[in-house]
Amino acid sequence: MTVTGRIMSGLVIVFLLFDGAIKLIPIAPVTETMLALGWPASVEMARGLGVLTLICTLLYATPRTSVLGAILLTGYLGGAMATHLRVGSPVFSHLLFGLYLGLLAWGGLYLRDARLRTLIPIRL
């Protein structure tokens, strides 16, 4: 169970580290996508989102702060979902991607952290 949780969390961490890194070096697809989503296509905005993504991801990746990181990532992903809803993005591929990532993050944390399983038991 712990190994599965670490793999799930690892996938989330790798994806978000990549996502944050490409926002720090705002390549053309990043700024074009931001503009299409209704955000300012500025270097400052892209870098700000990149820093925010990396901070939340590093908190999630650190065992002592992983629950705080998961909570912050949930808010961040919720904002991404709201943005996609506002611009009318496709539901299953774009809008719900934040939900998929959030479920993977929380599922991985749940499987790898016995304290979280004690706090939120699943009763069958």
Image (cartoon, grey):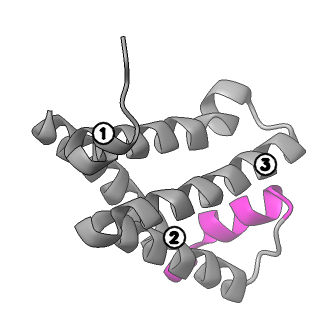
In this view, the mark in front (3 or 1): 1
Left or right of 108, for residue 97 = right
Amino acid carrying mark 3 in the image: Ala
| Residue under numbered circle 2 | 53
Reply yes or no: does residue 28 show up in magenta: yes
- Residues at badges 1 and 2 in contact (C-beta under 8 Å)? no
Label 2 element class: helix
- Residues at badges 3 and 1 in contact (C-beta under 8 Å)? no
Q: Earlier in the sequence, mark 1 or mark 2?
A: 2
For the residues labelled 1 and 2, the Cα–Cα distance comes to 26 Å
Q: Residue at x 78, y 48 (%)?
A: 82
| Residue under numbered circle 3 | 82
Q: Is residue 79 above or below residue 116?
A: below
| Residue under numbered circle 1 | 117
Reply yes or no: does residue 84 show up in magenta: no
Left or right of 124, for residue 44 = right
Range drawn in magenta: 24-38
Amino acid carrying mark 1 in the image: Arg
In this view, the mark in front (1 or 2): 1
Residue located farthest toward the left when viewing the structure as drawn: 3
Q: Earlier in the sequence, mark 3 or mark 1?
A: 3
Q: Residue at x 35, y 63 (%)?
A: 66
The x and y percentages for residue 86 are: 88, 46
Of the pair 11 and 71, the residue shown nearer to us: 71
Residue 5 figure quarter: top left
Label 1 element class: helix
Residue 40 figure quarter: bottom right
Residue 25 seen: no
Report the magenta stretch's main SS. Answer: helix
- Disc 3 crowd rating (10 Å Cα; few below 14, some 14-19, many 20+) is some
For the residues labelled 2 and 3, the Cα–Cα distance comes to 16 Å
The N terminus sits in image quarter: top left
